[in-house]
Image (spheres, helix red, strand yellow):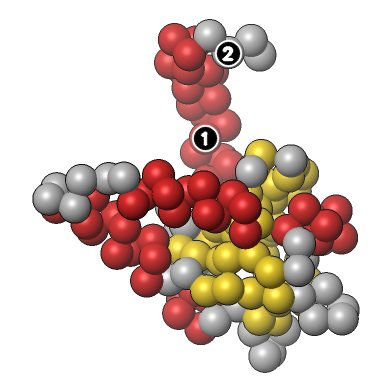
Amino acid sequence: MFMGEYQHSIDDKGRLIIPAKFREGLGDKFVMTKGLDNCLFIYPMGEWERLEQKLKALPFTKADARAFVRFFFSGATECELDKQGRVLVPQILREHASLDKDVVVIGVSSRVEVWSKEVWEKYCQDAKEDYETIAEKLADFDLEL
């Protein structure tokens, strides 16, 4: 399970240090792709394969399903860490998530997310205002918080 928030930066070559606490969970190879809310999603291979099976089951006759699958898979790339625990973030993914220098890497249960520091701070500020309302809506899922 991935959890926590870490401040990092991307170097001039587009490399990002993955927090040490996340490296073992990601394994030798993992998948990085365009995420929702202007961030990147990183999945361990096993989780990526489970997600891929679920997306394959979507009805390809539905335009929304085709659009989502195209978006999700077109940005996907298989990644490996170098000896310093860094991963090269492709330019197309850096552009998608508005990654420039300062980034935030967060653990979200089964995946890791990479955010522009500026976008993350705005997202947190907006979500903080609605946190209790969101929790009330999720009460229908029998979550014990």
Q: Left or right: where does residue 122 sit relative to residue 80?
A: left
Q: Is residue 28 left or right of residue 61?
A: right
Q: Please tell me in which quadrant of the rendered image residue 84 appears.
A: bottom right
Identify residue type, mark 1.
Ala
Q: Quadrant of the N terminus?
A: top right
Q: Are marks 2 and 1 in contact (CB under 8 Å)?
A: no
Residue at point 70%, 47% (across, down): 107
Q: Badge 2 is on which residue?
A: 143
SS at mark 2 in the image: loop
* Mark 2 residue type: Leu
- For this rendering, which residue is in front, 58 or 123? 58
Task: Give the label, 2 or 1, closer to the camera.
Answer: 2
Give the number of the disc on residue 14.
Answer: none
Q: What is the residue that sits farthest to the bottom in this orientation?
A: 13
Earlier sequence position, callout 2 versus callout 1: 1
The residue lying toward the viewer, choosing from 79 and 120, is 79
Number of numbered discs: 2
Q: Secondary structure at mark 1?
A: helix
Left or right: residue 71 versus residue 125 is left
**94 above or below 48?**
below
Task: Give the image location of residue 3, x and y in percent.
Answer: 74, 42
Q: Residue 96, can we see it?
A: no
Residue 46 appears anywhere in the view: yes
The C terminus lies in quadrant: top right
Q: What x and y, as percent, mark residue 112?
A: 65, 53
Whole-angstrom CA distance, mark 2 to mark 1, is 18 Å
Residue 49 horizontal side relative to residue 7, left or right: left
Q: Residues within 10 Å of mark 2 (few under 14, many from 20)?
A: few
Q: Residues within 10 Å of mark 1 (few under 14, many from 20)?
A: few
Relative to 116, does residue 16 appear above or below in the rendering?
below
Please give the label number shown on residue 127: 1
Q: Which residue is found at the position 76% from the left and 62% from the top?
A: 27
